[in-house]
Amino acid sequence: MKKGKSIALLVITGLLIAFFGVACFANFAIPDGVLKFFGAQPKYNYVSIFDQISKGIDLEGGYYAVMEPVTDDDALVASKINDVIRTLRARLDDKGYTEATISIQDGTKLRVEIPDIDDADAVLELLSSQGKLEFRDYTGKVWLDGENVSGARVGYDENGNYAVVLEFTPAGQAKFSQATATVANFTDGNNILYIYLGDTLVSSPSVQSQITSSSAQITGKFEYEDAETLAAVISGGALDLEFTIGTTSKISPTLGQGVVDNALLAAGIGMLIIFAILIIFYGGMGVAACIALLIYVILYVIVLALFPWVQLTFPGIAGIILSIGMAVDANIIIFERIKEEYASGKTMNNAIKTGFRRAFITVLDSNLTTILASIVLWILTSGSIQGFAITLFLGVILSMFSSIVVTRGFINLLKPLPKNPEKFYGLKRREE
């Protein structure tokens, strides 16, 4: 690559890093003149990508509700309450509230704490709905129920509106086929299959012919949040006991924005120290690693903001810091290998190529163990520990991409700049 092209690409990279760095971490008011030029409303405040990441109760606060059983039979409640907790946990996870907590209160009540929620009413509906799904004909006969549904998700109907797509079990598919075959033959406008959730009619499609597919749709004038809540209730299953919502209230953050700001400041200072050490010990390779780490941090923030099921907590921040450390470790392993290959007599180009190839197995092996551990924690735990596992998993995946792909690209991009690239990269021959 020619020197001029390298400089041009580095300048473009620097501008992109600056742009996305501001987009990720800066909050500011956009001048009215700029907004009017683009036809937007004046007095618009830009919110950083980081601030759009969903946060846990310890950082953002949330909402709590106490669920009270309708029955006075304490023995019945005691025998069923763990099943109810599992069902509610499944509903909350499907909805994306992985940091929500469920605890038993006063022996028979349930206290549910949900962080960073936008619509309290939707959460109350999610918790209080009994979730008993039934398909009935006009006579009231139940043809199939929630036991015959293997899952539910948000989809679209033929008009592009939100709908809830149901996936049937093999037995459910057979029952649905039989139900539609029977209902299609009803006359006088009775060829309707009524879909109930508890005592609420959620959809009433007309049936013109037998349907043998393994899925069906619940259609209506759904907003996305309504469809998502309904899908989560159906996927989670019916509650084994009937509960009502008692006390509800907002929860203040236990740590607050100050902790987040201090954590970001500490992370920034730590990154600067790491950059200085990498450049001192590895020269040009350290510069390439610093650029790759900046790109890694930006990508990490964007990924956390894109996934709705990621909720950032203080343990989650610990997972981020740990994954950044692993990204640095991977770079050091690669650089030491390159130095060894060059010291043994290889040319600089061959040393870089061989160093990355031979270090890849070591980096993969060390990161794979962490990835597997985070997956196990993700699956088997809940709450803050699950949040730590999710951020660690995403961070390690991105750190491998950063160290193996991005760092290598910038090492090659920087090569044409110095007159003595070997010295710039801190490479030396082994003394005999």
Image: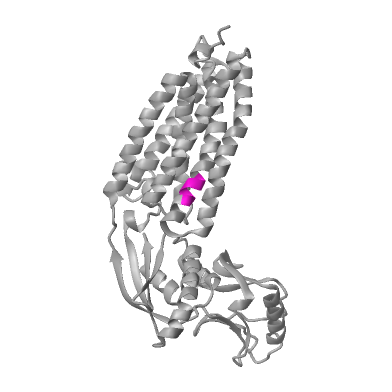
Tell which of 121 and 92 is nearer to you: 92
Tell which of 78 and 209 is nearer to you: 78
Q: Position of residue 72 (x, y in %)?
A: 39, 88
Which quadrant does the N terminus fall into? top right
Tell which of 14 and 345 is nearer to you: 345
- Seen in the picture, residue 133 relative to 186 is either above or below; the reply is above
Q: Is residue 166 magenta?
A: no
When asked about the image quadrant of residue 261, the answer is top left
Q: Is residue 118 visible?
A: no
Q: Position of residue 196 (x, y in %)?
A: 54, 82
Q: Is residue 366 visible?
A: yes
Identify the residue at image location x=58%, y=14%.
Answer: 343
When asked about the image quadrant of residue 273, the answer is top left
- Seen in the picture, residue 323 relative to 72 is either above or below; the reply is above
Q: Is residue 393 magenta?
A: yes
Tell which of 188 and 137 is nearer to you: 137
Which quadrant does the C terminus fall into? top right
Marks counted in the figure total 0
When asked about the image quadrant of residue 189, the answer is bottom right
Magenta-highlighted residues: 389-394
- Seen in the picture, residue 233 relative to 326 is either above or below; the reply is below
Identify the residue at image location x=56%, y=38%.
Answer: 366
Main SS type for the magenta part? helix
* Figure colour scheme: one colour
Q: Position of residue 77 (x, y in %)?
A: 44, 82
- Seen in the picture, residue 252 relative to 208 is either above or below; the reply is above
Q: Position of residue 281 (x, y in %)?
A: 44, 20
Q: In this image, 377 relative to 45: left or right?
A: right
